[in-house]
Amino acid sequence: TTLVNSRLAMSAVLQSQSIPPPKKANPANTAMPLPTRMVLAAFSGMGAATCCHPLDVIRVQMQTTGGATGAYKNTLDAGIQIYTRSGLRQGLYAGISAAYLRQWLYGSCRIGIYCYLLERAQIANREAGRDANDIAFVSKLSMGCLSGGIGSFVGTPSEVALVRMSADSKAPIEQRRNYKNVFECVFRITKEEGVLNLWRGALPTVMRATLLSACQMGVTSEAKLFLARSGYFGPNGDYMHGLPKLFVATLFSSFCANIVANPFDVIKSRLQNMTIHADGTAMYRGMADCFVKSIRAEGPMVLYAGFTPAFIKLAPYSVISLTLADKLTKALTGKEAL
């Protein structure tokens, strides 16, 4: 019996030595699920939209009324006229419900998908023994293009509703559509004009979002690395928890994105806001027709109508939304989002 017990004990020891203990998962190599990233992105976007929506209303009204030809003297004049005419709720905050829906459809994809793809690339680099941030700038631009394109196509109905509701207060009272909220707006467009009109202007919308997202997301990530290495923002750019570094990076990327995207923004806003007459005719036949007619009537600078309010809106929106996304991600995972 003693001999059998000894052999069993020896066998157990040998087995324990031959089976290595299970490896613990490295948190740095565990990606946050895509749905979680998209939810964080949506809430981040809603916070930014709450602060910046009046500037979006001003931008849309300047772009749809020929801002380059003097309908409004400047951004401040547009804001004063809109507030005087329609007040805060029906004027500067008209369409805020559409702006929130847009964040759940477009913003969640744009920021969420980009951050997910960036993290997967960083994990692949770590597993290959390379620096996690050794990602080509072109790859970051491609990630931004993909996330912006997907988000824009999914979110085009909310974009159409946002433009309609933002521009409604400038129309004569008898011509106003008077949408109560984004859901009524979407329902009425579907009923009165057909479901396909929810994707009116989808081509310039997707093109704009693709370019804007590529610049905004890709340039922000690249600028963050450059600023961190510059030494002006503390060791590894961590001065004040990295907030000044992130502020400068998002401000620069917003300016770049606005230069590239504004012409498409003007065309998109005009297509989405135009009225379809009973006989099926409209002011513009499509993107190219809108482009030609707008330049012919108002000159090439019409493509940059609303540039100032667009940038003034995009810059704080980018700073707030990307900072919230970055810091919420860091609070949950200990890693940066961008």
Image (cartoon, rainbow, N blue to C red):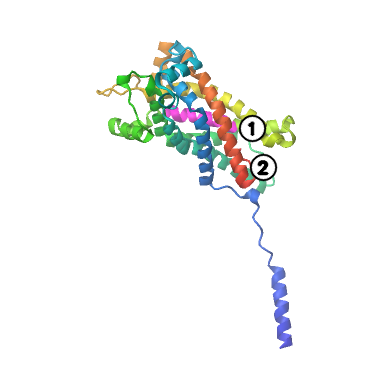
Q: Which mark is residue 132?
A: 2
Residue in view at x 63 percent, y 35 percent? 136
Q: Amino acid at mark 2?
A: Ala
User: Which comes sooner in the sequence, label 2 or label 1?
Assistant: 2
Residue 141: in sight, yes or no? no
Determine the CA span between mark 2 and mark 1. 19 Å
- Determine whether, in the image, residue 8 is placed left or right of residue 169: right
Front-lying residue, 37 or 122: 37
Circle 2 — which element? Answer: loop
Dot 1 alpha-carbon crowd within 10 angstroms: few under 14, some 14 to 19, many 20 or more: many
- Name the amino acid type tagged 1: Leu
Q: Position of residue 143 (x, y in %)?
A: 55, 36
| Quarter of the image that includes the C terminus | top right
What x and y, as percent, mark residue 56?
A: 47, 25
Query: Could you tell whether 76 is left or right of 248 in the image?
Result: left
Q: Is residue 93 left or right of residue 316?
A: left
Residue 300's place in the image compared with 163, above or below, is above
Does the stretch in magenta take in 204? yes
Look at 41% across and 16% down and name the residue there: 65
Q: Which residue is mark 1?
A: 246
Q: Main secondary structure of the magenta part?
A: helix
Tag 1 secondary structure = helix
Query: Which percent across, then down, holds residue 229?
Result: 72, 33
Asked whether residue 163 is drawn in magenta, I would say no
Q: Which residues are magenta?
A: 202-218
Q: Is residue 24 above or below residue 98?
A: below
Measuring 48% from the left and 34% from the top, which residue is drawn there?
A: 149
Q: Is residue 82 left or right of residue 230?
A: left
Residue 83's quadrant in the figure? top left
